[in-house]
Amino acid sequence: MNLADLEPGESGVVQKLLLTGSQRRRLLNIGLLRNTKVQCLGRSPAGDPSAYLIRGAVIALRAKDCQEIILS
Amino acid sequence: MGLTKGSVAGGALDAGLVIKKRRSQDRVVALAGNPNVGKSTIFNALTGLHQHTGNWPGKTVANAQGYYSNGQNSYVLVDIPGAYTLLASSAEEEVAREFICSGQADVVVVVCNAASLERNLNLVLQTLEITRRVVVCVNLLDEAQARGLKLDLPALERLLGVPVVGTVASQPQTLAALKQAIDRQADVAQYVDQPAEHSVCDLDLCTVISGQTSEELREELMSLFMQRAEEVAAQVVTGPADHYRRSLDWKIDRLLTSRLWGYALMLLLLAVVFWLTLVGANYPSALLSEGFFWLGERLNDGLSSLHAPLWLQELLVNGVWRTLGWVVSVMLPPMAIFFPLFTLLEDVGYLPRVAYNLDRPFQACHACGKQALTMCMGFGCNAAGVIGCRIIDSPRERLLAILTNNFVPCNGRFPTLIALISMFFVWQTGMASSWLAALLLVLVILLGIGLTFLLTNLLSRTILQGEASSFALELPAYRRPRLLSVIVRSVFDRTLFVLGRAVVVAVPCGLLIWLLANLHWGDSSLLMQLASWLEPLGRLFGLDGVILLAFILGLPANEIVMPIMVMCYLQTGSLTEMADLTELRQLFVANGWTWQTAVCTLLFMLLHWPCSTTLLTIKQETGSWRWTALAFALPTVCGLVLCFVAARLLSLF
């Protein structure tokens, strides 16, 4: 499953990032690495992006990018 | 908002930091930290409120220096750009790493957010790998407490081996311990080689990391540091497992970003801000106008008693002074209300939620959600909005945001929009009509926002094709606004700055317009000749020659468009006292205005070329005259087309 599959309230652990280049770096910067626990908090009014709790900070990510983040 | 002296006037300074010491014995203290940890608040609290303002990401790093002294030591405090890590390769992070590596800092203070200590410790551990002259400042303890988190700071100090202090930056008394810790670290004459037990990777980060470092090595190092940060945080932080979803922040966010209320509340907030601006500005505007008029009379008397020639009196009082008076009295009150309100929303942390709510429509236009933020900045000043586009990482999406920024009206255009709406569409005074005026204004702005989406979409399907890049937007915790700082920042840095610019433009323009109005060619003034020459063109778009001329002469600043119109209509080449909008309305009607003219003028006020400052800023930011020309053409063509259609349609009524 990937991060986009998480419903609000659910949590998962990152297994790997399929993204490359600057998009990958941006996520690594905010602490989204292998074995990081992520909780889905909610969705924006239009359903996308969604808000995730990552290492204590709330980060909004688009579904398109979340599909590239594989959970274990 | 990025609308400060530094961001608009100064050029981009993305190069390294240059330290300006006041005295040779000044110690250098670097202030590092993740974005959104309250670094600026700490900086201001240590150095005094005025030295550093505005905390938009992407702001210039120039001037981010301040001074303070504590007992016998005096310090230069250097605010280095916010960075999540020293291992990455973004411009900000390079500046941060290079500065820490350069060894110029006697002490590096790493500011952490207590509520997300784990991620912040990453930067702390990387900094400690480079220097041991570090003070760790765990800020926002109150926010962590509100989430039910407990932090064992003495344990953190033991684990890290450097001083750790806890602070609540909005309470200056908690900063005393930070100052003492900085004193202690600055006085340590020389550090012994760092104890091996603290090292995470046994590598010299300053030599290992460069532009050529492989992504694999960066990532490996990042994991290593993050892992250690996790271990440390696990020993320091205790709290309930699901703490965030139980916090007040999350409850507020659930409301402000809910499917049902998210957009409605955004609109309501916009309407309330405009209503307060409209209602609040009326009275002080009238008062200022009377004051300026009265002073103008005295100036006239003074000049007469000095036996100054009549043309000089006319020129100075009727030309320069009254234009100045008009610009100040029409512009100052709305700005002095709008800017603080807006800064308040910014300070509380609402703006990132706007970007969150509006990302989906921007995504549909293949653009970046952060464009919502730069659009908001445009409400203050389009030039500032264009500079603010630096927060958008992808060059294609940044261009989209720059090219469409002018579609939202800036503060130089609000007063005219407000005056036109009040004159032609709201007759009665009182509560109901002020709401009607605010709603009409919201409609005009919604048209601007709608066109922003339309044009963004159009551009990204034609000349700026591409897929939307990834997007990671932090939604920082809501913060109690610091009222004093909001007022200082909005009034001094924004209101007076924008007003100053308008005045600088208004004075020579007043002079020029007076000359055009008083120099005659044949039987009428140059001004009227120009206007009558433009008349057929103006008519085509539902305007008239005078209106079009006013817009053209108003290129330096939109604020002076209305005064030029008034001057032309009066033909005497000078302004009379125009505090009363009904009087002004009579003047316009006597010169052939109908409500249809007002609609077309409103449309053209919303949609015409950017002011010269904005154009120059676009040139500077895009480095290309071609993009600048496009930024000029887009709103102008839109405005002309809309005015043309509106004039044809409305003439049926």
Image (spheres, coloured by chain):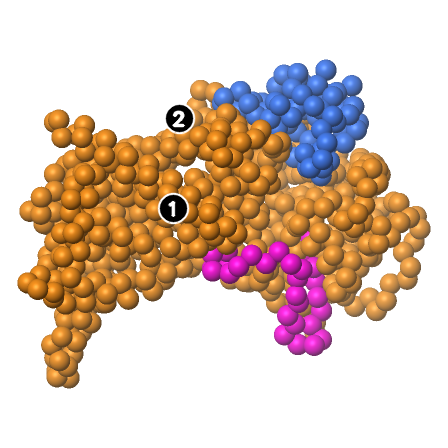
As rendered, which of B239 and B107 lies closer to the eye?
B107
Mark 2 lies on a secondary structure that is helix
| Residue at the (56%, 31%) spot, across then down | B466
The disc labelled 1 sits on which kind of residue? Phe
Above or below: residue B382 compared with residue B303: above
| Residue at x 66%, y 16% (from the top left corner) | A5
Q: Nearer the viewer, residue B612 or A4?
A: B612
Q: Which range of residues does the magenta coloring cover?
A: B5-32
Work out how far the residue at label 1 is from the one at label 2, CA to CA, in angstroms: 33 Å
In the displayed structure, B627 sits above or below A39; it is: below
Chain identifier, blue in the render: A
Magenta stretch containing residue B631, yes or no?
no
- Across and down, in percent, residue A19 comes to 71, 28
Label 1: which residue?
A: B632
The secondary structure type at the circle numbered 1 is helix
Going from N to C along the chain, the mark reached first, 1 or 2, is: 2
